[in-house]
Amino acid sequence: MSAVMEGPLADLGSWKPDHCSLVKALEIVGTRSALLILREAYYGTTRFSAFARRIGVTERIAAQQLRHLTEAGLLAKRPYRDEGGRTRDEYGITEMGRDLLPAVLGLMQWGDKYFQDDTPPLLYVEHETGEAVTVELRSDSGHRVELEELGVRLNPDWRPPRD
Amino acid sequence: MSAVMEGPLADLGSWKPDHCSLVKALEIVGTRSALLILREAYYGTTRFSAFARRIGVTERIAAQQLRHLTEAGLLAKRPYRDEGGRTRDEYGITEMGRDLLPAVLGLMQWGDKYFQDDTPPLLYVEHETGEAVTVELRSDSGHRVELEELGVRLNPDWRPPRD
DNA sequence: AGGCTGACTATACTTTTGTATAGTCAGGAA
DNA sequence: TTCCTGACTATACAAAAGTATAGTCAGCCT
């Protein structure tokens, strides 16, 4: 069982997944530390040393990834200052970073199910109602979609990039 | 802006994300090649050489990751035989592998938006209707949930593992 | 002026992930 | 019995991601 490969995509031998968005995404967030930094940003962590301490990574890696994610646009630096201290920079999540939440939470929920016996340490809920939150595939009209119902087709509007 | 950290979780300085499901998930699928193999499995690729060729990775890496993902339970080997050939093994996706689809498609859609100018080479639709499919956070009653509405709380049923 | 604090950088090393190229191996077909 | 094919393995190496430890540096407070 797999997705429904439509039209010429059905013959897997006849094409190769070039210009794949997954590949491009992984170039930015394809490492452990990048995704853990995002998790922390979702939790509300903003400061350099908190990132390093909470994800358990050396300051070198934290600095590297924070720079990398900031340059890529997932995080944004902004000045802060707490009383009796100098002005410094902290890191806040941007819309681009926020848009990765489904992917990150999808990984978490998968881990919850298969490595925590469905009893993970943390629960993700709708804050207002307390209802459990899940990451799902939905069609535009709101219908849930399973792998076997998912169609993959060529985008007629796609044009090869000039680079 | 971030998720709503409930109760004692609000003070990020007072706890560390131990036993995190994301960390456990990344131990299995935290590499480029693992996620690309999953993509291919969703597309319907089943054979060793097709995996290697289509994701553009050496046979060594393909063999390594196929073994790894099979041992972890995301893929399952099964015999096949096409006419005039001997019996060999191919790899099919399991329920465990299928359950990662939201995470993988979430990464793809993020790539579509930010690196393809919203005009990616492939479209993901509900096959029956042709409607676009998106990966979303939903509460049990079907309400869409944004980052700011997401509550994170301690699971009262959680017990530390004995290992 | 000197110390403190948080955000980094420098140097050196290890591990993991990946490439490149060649070879093995099972077993049905000719 | 020898060939062919698809699924691997062997060896050697390169590059990326991460560890460990120590040091720098800006600027506010005393």
Image (cartoon, coloured by chain):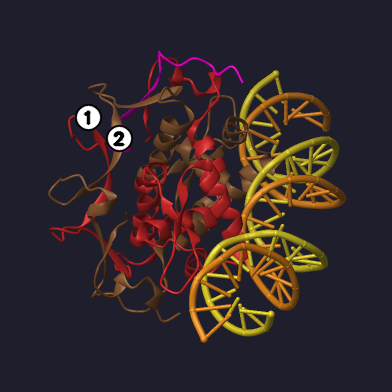
Chain colours: A brown, B red, C orange, D yellow
Q: Residue A23, how many percent across, how many down?
A: 47, 62
Q: Going 58% across and 30% down the picture, which residue do you hit? A: A54
Q: Can you say which quadrant of the picture contains the C terminus of chain A? A: bottom left
**Which amino acid type corresponds to the residue marked 1 in the rendered image?**
Asp
- In the image, taking residue A114 as reference, residue B33 lies left or right, namely right
| Mark 2, residue position | A134
Q: Quadrant of residue A1?
A: bottom left
Pick the residue in front: A15 or D7: D7
Looking at the picture, does residue A86 appear above or below residue A117?
A: below
Q: CA distance from mark 1 to mark 2?
A: 8 Å
Q: Residue A6, how many percent across, how many down?
A: 24, 68
Q: Going 31% across and 71% down the picture, which residue do you hit? A: A9
- In the image, taking residue A42 as reference, residue B59 lies left or right, namely right
| Mark 1, residue position | B140
**Which amino acid type corresponds to the residue marked 2 in the rendered image?**
Thr
Q: Residue A22, how many percent across, how many down?
A: 43, 59
| Residue at mark 2: chain | A
Q: Residues within 10 Å of mark 1 (few under 14, many from 20)?
A: some
Res. B122 in view: yes
Res. A44 in view: no
- Answer yes or no: do the residues labelled 1 and 2 have beta carbons within 8 Å? yes
Find the magenta span and give its range.
Answer: B146-163
Marks 1 and 2: same chain? Answer: no
Q: Residues within 10 Å of mark 2 (few under 14, many from 20)?
A: many
Q: Residue A137, how many percent across, how many down?
A: 26, 47
